Image (cartoon, coloured by chain):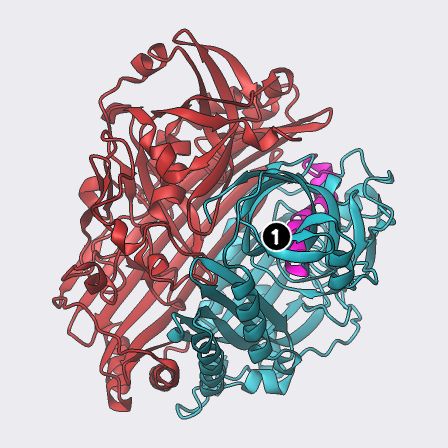
Amino acid sequence: MWDLCTNALDTAKLRGATYGDVRVMHLRQRDLTTKNGQVGTLAQSESLGLGIRVLANGAWGFASTDRLTREGLAACAAQAVSIAKASALAKRSEVVLAPEKAYVDSWQSPFRKDPFEIPLETQLALLLAADAEMRQVKGVTLTETDMQFRKIDSWFASSIGSRIHQRKVISGCGIAATSFQGEEIQKRSYPNGFGGQHSLQGYELVESLDLMRNAPLIAEEAAALHSVSQCPEKVGTLILGGSQLGLQIHESIGHPIELDRVLGQEANFAGTSFLTLDQLDQLKYASSIVNVVADARLDHGQGLGTFAYDDEGVPAQCTDIIKDGTFRGYLSNRETAHLVGLDRSSGTMRTESWNRLPIIRMTNVSLLPGTWDYDDLISDTHDGILLETNRSWSIDDRRYQFQFSTEIGWEIKGGKKVRMLKNPSYSGISTEFWNSCDAICRFDHWTLWGTPNCGKGQPMQTVGTGHGAAPARFRNVHIGTAFSNQ
Amino acid sequence: MKPPAQNRKVSTASSAGAAELLHERELRRIVDTVLRLAKSTGAEEAEVHVDEVADALTRFANNAIHQNVAEHGLTVSIRTVVDGRTARATTNRIHEDSLRSAIEVSLSLAHRQPKDPRLLPMPGKQRYRAVNRFIKQTAALSAEERARAVRHACDLAVKKGQVAAGIYSNGQSQSVVGNSRGLFAAYRETHSEFSITAQEGPAASWAKANSTDVRAFDPQKLAARACQKAHLAINSRELAPGRYTVILEPAAVLDLVGFLFYDFAATALEDKRSCLNERMAKQLFGQNISISDDVYHALQQGAPFDGEGLPRQRVLLVDCGIPKNLVYSRAAAQAAGKRPTGHGFALPNEYGEAPMNLVFGGGDSSMDKMVTSTDRGLLVTRLWYIREVDPYEKVMTGMTRDGLFLVENGRVTGAARNFRFNQSLIEMLKNVELLGPAVRATGEEAFEMVVPAMKVRDFCFSEVTKF
C-alpha cells in the first residue's frame, strides 16, 4: 500500500503540489437484521480505494479513485492538482497549515473477539432469539434486531514524511419492539434507539449487552405505553438517562465547537455556530459542575471517536471543551488552529472513506462524571421527570434552540419513580440548559455511547462519534413542548 | 476475465474534469462474468448490480473556494440464492478472483441462515420504457468552469457587502442489473446542482437548483436571489409562537412532505408502522391534494427499474385527498395478492419498497397571489433539521432557516426570527388553501420531488430561537 501512496504523492509533487496527503482505505462491513422473526438484511461488503488531497497555488484539491493501477493513481493525483489550481481561481487567501511532525507508526484498536470470525449462525441465532422474546409479548406488532460490524484499514502518507497504518474494529447491536394500537405507534429500543450501541470493540460488545434479558422488558414497555398518561407540559426538573444525554451533548456542545462551522465553512449546509471566536474563555457555557472534553485517546475509552492519529496525520489528543462551566476549546485542524491562537491542530480531521475529504469532526465529546449515585439522584428529586432513549432530535442551524423527544418517561414524586409517561419531550436554549445542570452521576453510571450516523459535509459523509455520559439533572426545563399544541 | 479497469478512461489533468464512465457493454461483461462464475460455484440463482459514479463538487465559503473534490468509483453487488435462502456481497474490486470471492461470501452467508418463506424466484427478462437523462454538457462541466461561476457568485456577494457559501456540483452515474433468468436493465444519468447561502450580518438567505441538465439553471440568478433575500432578512423581529398562515416555498414543502414517502409502502402497512394504517380509502387530506409516484415525469430523475430489475410503474397514491394505492415489491405484492409496482429495494432487506419519485398535483397560484391574499402570515424560504415526533399523526418538528418573512395586509413587511414548528403533516395537508404550479424542488432533508408552493392555514410554531 505504501507504494500506492508514494506514487500518488510523487505525481502530485511533479504536477506542482506543495503539500499532499494520501489515504488508502480498505473497508469491510457485515450487516445483519431481523424483523418479526425472519432474517431481513444479510449482507457483507468491502471497498478499497485511494483519496489524495493536495495544495497547489495555495488552494486545496482532492480526488479519489478505486483504480489502483499505476496509471489510475497518476491520473487521480494529477486530477487533484488540477482541481487545486482551479480552486485558486476563487481564493481569497493562501492556505497555511500549522506545523506537525512526521510519524511512522502502526496501530490497531483493541478487541477480544473478531466479529468477522464469529460464526454467522451464532450471530443470527442471538438476534432471532431476542426477536422471539419480544414477539411473545401481547400487543407488540413489530420486532426488529440488528448487528453491524466493520473493519477499517487505513494507510496514511503525507509529503512531510508520515506513514501511518491504523486498523479499527467497530461493532454495533440493538433491538426494538413497536406496538400499534388504536391511533398510536409506540416503540422501545435497547440499549439505544436507531441501531443500539456502537463502539470500537469486537464481538464482546454484543455479548456484554444481555439482549435476552432486556428483550421482554422493552417489549412490555412498548405495549404498556399505550395505556399510560401523556407527559405533561410544564417547566420543571428533568433527569436525562445516559444515552439521551449523549445525544444532547452531541447536538448542543459537539457540533457548536467545530471550528469549520464557527468560521462559516458549513454555512450553506450543516450551519454555523453561536460559539463565535470572542466567546472562547469567556462564555459561561454551563454550570460549574460541568466539565466536557473532546478525547480521541484510547485512555478515554473505546468509542467511535477513538483513534491513534486523525486523517490529517495528527496524533489523538484530549482537549478541554468546558472546564468548570466555562467554554475553553474548539475542535480544530491544521488549517484553522492558528485562528484560535493554537500552534497545533487538536487532531479532529476525519473521513468516512477513501472517496471523501477529511473534515473537522467530533471525536469522543464527553461529559465527565460527577459525584452522584443514581439512586441518590432519584431520591433527591422531589418533583421531576426522567426521560430515556431518544425518539427524535432537532436543533437550529446555529445550535441555540433544540427539541428532543424520547421513547419513555417516568414521573418522579417525592424521590420515587411513580409512573410511566408516554410521548415525552423537552426543549431549550443550549447555554441556558447546560447552566441549569445541578447534578451528574458518578463514573460507575458513565457509558461511552456511540452515535454511528453523524452526517456533515458536501458531499455528505457519515462518521461515528463517541459521547461519554452519566445520568444528570437539569432544573427549570420546558417539558412536553412537542405535543403542546397537537 | 480481463479487468475492465484497464479500459477505464480518466480525463487529462489539464481539464480537471470528471472521469468518464465505462461503456454499457463493459458493465454487461461484468454481469455476464459474475453470472458465469456464480453458476459454476453452485448458486441456483444469481443477480448482479453494477453501479458506477463519477462526481465532482466545488464548495465555497467566506466568498472563496475552500473544498474542491472529485470521485470515481464502481461497485459490483452480487446476490445469490441457494435452497430458498439469499444473501448479498458487494465489492469494488473487479478482477475475476475478487468477483469469485464475493460470490463465495454471498453463498456462504446465504447457506448459514434459515429458509426465507417469502423468497420468490428471480424475475425473468423485462421490457423498459426508455428515458433519456444523460446530458453531455452536464457531464463535461469542468472544475475551471465551476470555479469561474463560483467566483462570479462570490463577487456579487462581496459587492453587496455579504458573505456567500455554497456548492456547485456535477456528475454522471450508471447502474445495470442483470440476473441468471435473463433479466438485464441499464440506466445512466447526469446530475448538477448549485446552492448558495448569502449572509448579511446575522441575516441569511438561500437558493438552490438541481437538474440533469446544467443549462436548466443559472448560478448567477440563484446568487442574485439569495443576496436579495438576505438583505430583506436583516433586522428580523421576534414574533410570538402560535398558529400562523404560512406560505411555503417549494423547498419547504418538499422537506416536509418528503417524510411521507415510506408510509405508502405496502410493507410499512403490513408492519403497522405507516400513518396510513386503517386510513386507506378515507378522506385523509384536503380535496386539493393528489400525489403520484412517477419516475417518467419530465422533472424527475432515477432509473426506470427497481432493485430487482422490475420496471417502475406510475402509481396514483392519493386522489383528491384520499389515499388510494400503495407501492409493492414482488414479495409484498405476493403477500397482499396484488401486482408488483416496480418499487422494491434490492434484496434482501426488511423495508420492502417505497415510492422514490413523488409528484404532487399543483395549482395555478403564483407566490405573489399567495402573498397578496394573506392578511397576516409568514413566508417560509426553507426548513431545517426536520424529525418525526409522532409516527402515526405524522407530527414533525424542525426549524425555519435562511429567510422567514412576515406578511401583513397582502405584502411582505419585514423579517421574523426563526421558529421551531411541531406540525402534523396530515393536518397540514387538510389545511392547504392555495397551490402553486408543481416544480422540481430541492432541499436538504428529502430527495428531490415535484411539488408546488403551498399556502397553509394554522401552521403550528411552538417556540422561537435567538436569530
Total numbered labels? 1
> Residue A388, how many percent across, how many down?
45, 26
> Residue B431, how many percent across, how many down?
78, 43
Magenta residues (range):
B250-275
- What amino acid does circle 1 point to? Val
The residue lying furthest to the top in this view is A414
Question: Which residue in the structure is indicated by mark 1?
Answer: B82
Camera-nearest residue between A299 and A73: A299
Does A114 sit above or below residue A13?
above
Res A309 quadrant in image: bottom left
At horizontal 71% and vertical 60% (from top left) the residue drawn is B357
At horizontal 56% and vertical 62% (from top left) the residue drawn is B232
Q: Any idea which chain is the cyan one in this picture?
A: B
Res B12 quadrant in image: bottom left
Determine the colour of chain A.
red
Camera-nearest residue between A258 and B333: A258
Residue B268 counted in the magenta span: yes
Residue B322 appears in view = yes
Q: Chain of mark 1?
A: B
